[in-house]
Image (cartoon, helix red, strand yellow):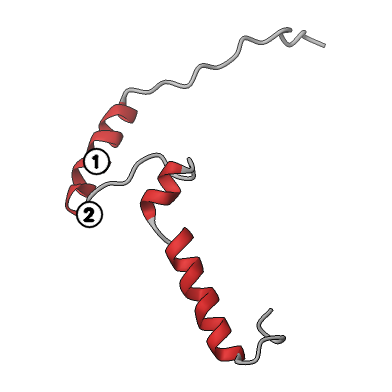
Amino acid sequence: EIQAADDPEGERKRLVDDYRARLEHPYIAAAKGYIDDVIDPRDTRVKIAHALEMLRTKSVPVPPKKHGNIPL
């Protein structure tokens, strides 16, 4: 597209601006499900601390073994 245009640099700028307007926005990414949440940068420390506090008591269950080791 860019190489075939009469003004390649102008076409490139138009495509970049279009890309930024459509895709380079956190709320659009959140609406499409690419990210879970959009937070204010001032709240980042609080959100991370809250997430780490929840993970502090997380336990990962170990699935039971089907067979024990037999002595050989």
Q: Position of residue 60 (x, y in %)?
A: 47, 21
Write down the residue under mark 2: 41
Task: Tell us which disc is closer to us: 1 or 2.
Answer: 2
- Amino acid type at circle 2 is Pro
Q: Which residue corresponds to the image point at 24% horizontal and 41% vertical from the top-left? A: 47
Tag 1 near tag 2, CB within 8 Å = no
- Kind of residue sitting beneath label 1: Lys
Q: Quadrant of the N terminus?
A: bottom right
Circle 2 SS class: helix
Q: Residue furthest right?
A: 72
User: In the picture shown, does residue 63 fall above or below 18?
Assistant: above
Circle 1: element type: helix
On the image, the x and y values in percent for residue 19 come to 51, 67
Question: Which disc, if any, is residue 47?
Answer: 1
Q: Is residue 25 above or below residue 13?
A: above
Above or below, 39 against 14 in this view is above
In which quadrant of the rendered view does residue 55 lie?
Answer: top left
Is residue 72 left or right of 3 when viewed as pictured?
right
For mark 1, does the 10 Å Cα neighbourhood hold few (<14), some (14 to 19), or many (20 or more) residues?
Answer: some
Q: Position of residue 38 (x, y in %)?
A: 32, 46
Left or right: 3 as drawn, with respect to 32: right
- First of labels 1, 2 by sequence position: 2
Q: CA distance from mark 1 to mark 2?
A: 10 Å
Q: Position of residue 3 (x, y in %)?
A: 70, 87
Mark carried by residue 35: none
Please identify the quarter of the rendering in which residue 68 is found.
top right
